[in-house]
Amino acid sequence: MEITFLDILNTLRKGAFETIKILPLSMLFSLIAGTILGAIQSKKIPVVKYLINAYIIIMRGIPPLLLMMLFFFALNINVPFIAAVIVLSIYHTGYITEIVRGGIEAISKGQFEAAESLGLSNFKTMSKVIIPQIWYQVIPALGGQYIILVKDTVLISVIGVREILWSGRQLMQLTYKPFQIFFLIGVFFYVICFALQQITIWAEKSLKQKSVDSGRRT
Amino acid sequence: MKGDVLVSFNSVTKSFGNHIVIDHSSIQFFEGETHVICGRSGAGKSTLIRCINYLEKIDSGRLYFRDLEVNKKNAKEIRKKISMVFQEFNLFPHLTILENAVLGPVYALKEPKDKAEKRARELFEQVGIMEKIHHYPYQLSGGQKQRAAIVRALNMNPDLILFDEPTSALDPEMIGEVTEVIKGLVKEGRSMIIVTHEMNFALEASDKISFLSEGKILLTKPSKEFFQKPEYDTIRKFLRQILGTKKEDKESEYE
């Protein structure tokens, strides 16, 4: 049976759908966890700060592929989709924590003092005053991290997620047309990464004015 | 003396590293009083008032707000009763000025939002920037920002307002609009401690003036007396320098 171009597109579409399902979940979980850990880390709480530091160093020090295999085979999380979301979230949380901490530390001391002098709790100071202000600072780094996350999704095929690269490899064995197939996969990733870049630029521009510290002379 | 003791420093010391900023200082601030703190740059004026709401922790001595000792444990409670206006405004840039004014009452005082908003609108009307309430800080002039910061402080319904050089970051033409607002608060009989170099304003609006030099409170006098009989050379020199540039004819009084 001959495999037509339409069949190739259809198979890749199914793989792309798997990739797209995993992306927003991993992005969301790593952002939430990274923001919480980054906020805690900025408080420099003894012991806790060393624990978070250790986590960051471990995530930075091991390849995501190894982490993927560790979770899937050693920890026996044998639902590939769940294992993929967990691993990508945990891995990128390590980086996003540092991005968020840097963003918090870039906020002027006066903003913390103004919030404290209003009697706001630590939690409200962070959630209502500081965190909403960091996005302008961290968006370029966060956008870059998300682009890496998108590219890391190709690794999840090793634990059996039938994402786009996995689909491409299956097709290649049937059609012997690697160039066309991998070109299409490349276009898919390029479009997602380009869209992310554009969103990053748009978000940065739209947050720019509101993020000007009121103390600075305009 | 207008009322009860509101803030009491008893031999308070505060250092940054080896540098002593407040040196065994004792002073009392009273309810309903406008008390100006003046002195040269680095004399410890800002640090003194920042200790009152625990933005700075004292090293030794005793500091009380009413009957509450100012310490970590009581800081949150004290901050609900003392508002602060900063030199650099420190408005929250991601919020409109109305949202800035409502944040404290809603999240610290647990007031209903509509009640806090209603009071904020009245205060914005009072300081003359009602038409700007939905603007963000970056859309305002320096004077408008500082008036918005004053509204944020007032909307906490505080027992005491601390002003840390409220006009120092302003262009000269905007100083007047802020000092007029503060003079209005003086007429309302609010308790205020103001760190300022605006000595003409201090003379017109304050009940008392204290002079700080090298972390010590050199002199505290009712404002008119302070200007009439400056007892120390260092104060006479300070007044000559501050007023000399603004009011040449006053200079002779301090020779």
Image (spheres, rainbow, N blue to C red):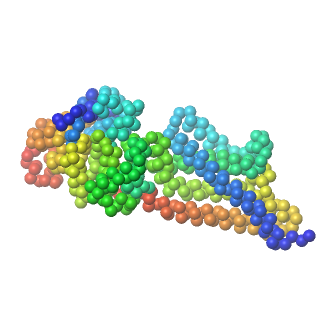
Q: Residue at x 53, y 46 (%)?
A: A101
Q: Residue at x 38, y 32 (%)?
A: B74
Q: Residue at x 70, y 57 (%)?
A: A21
- x then y, percent, for residue A140: 55, 58
Q: Specify the quadrant that holds the N terminus of chain B.
A: top left
In the displayed structure image, the side of residue A137 where residue A95 appears, left or right: right
Compared to residue B1, the image places residue A33 above or below, namely: below
- x then y, percent, for residue A64: 71, 48
Q: Specify the quadrant that holds the C terminus of chain B.
A: top left
Q: Nearer the viewer, residue A168 or B189?
A: B189
Can residue A179 be seen in the rendering of this structure? no
In the displayed structure image, the side of residue B205 where residue B164 appears, left or right: right
Q: Residue at x 32, y 44 (%)?
A: B157
Quadrant hosting residue B3: top left
Can residue B252 be seen in the rendering of this structure? yes
Compared to residue B66, the image places residue A90 above or below, namely: below
